[in-house]
Amino acid sequence: MCRNIKTLRPPYSDDVTEDDMRAAALQYVRKVSGFRHPAAHNAEAFEKAVDRVAAATGELLASLVVRS
């Protein structure tokens, strides 16, 4: 679905930033919603979704156990 979202977990990426997680969340929400830039009346819902997906991404990455 979102082929250009880069893998954020180690060993693919060792220095994931909040910006990386937000960029991935933004791409995901854009894809799912079909909006590149939502109309003003949808902006709050769009931003809330991006925030929630970014937070879920952070929680996921923090809880993953990667074995080498």
Image: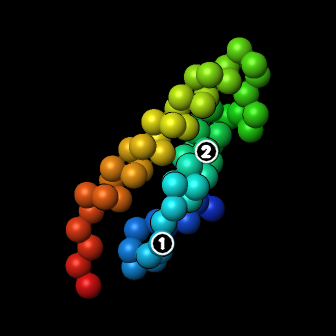
Q: Residue at left 26%, top 85%? A: 68
Q: Which residue is mark 2?
A: 26
Q: What is the secondary structure assignment of the residue under circle 1? A: loop
- How many numbered marks have been drawn onto this rendered protein structure? 2
> Going by the image, does 44 lie left or right of 16?
right
Q: Label 1: which residue?
A: 15
Instruction: From the top left corner, tell me how far across and down residue 22 is, in percent.
Output: 56, 49
Residue at 48% x, 66% y is 16
Which coloring applies here? rainbow
Q: Position of residue 3 (x, y in %)?
A: 59, 60
- In whole angstroms, how far apart are the C-alphas of marks 2 and 1? 19 Å
Given residues 15 and 31, the one toward you in this image is 15
Viewer-side label of 2, 1: 1
- Give the residue furthest to the bottom: 68
Give x and y (percent) for residue 2: 58, 54
Residue furthest top in the image: 41
Where residue 65 sits: x, y (%)? Answer: 23, 68
The part of the image, by quadrant, that contains residue 46 is: top right
Q: Which quadrant of the structure image shows residue 67? A: bottom left
State the SS at label 2. helix
**Within-10-Å neighbours for mark 2: few <14, some 14–19, many 20+:** many
Please tell me which residue is depicted at 42% across the width and 43% down the height of the picture. Answer: 55
Residue type of the residue flagged with mark 1: Asp
For marks 2 and 1, the one nearer the N-term is 1
Can see residue 2? no
Q: Is residue 24 left or right of residue 57?
A: right
Mark number, residue 35: none
**Residue type at tag 2:** Leu
How busy is the neighbourhood of tag 1: few (under 14 within 10 Å), some, or many (20 plus)? few
Q: Which residue appears at 67% of the width and 20% of the height?
A: 42
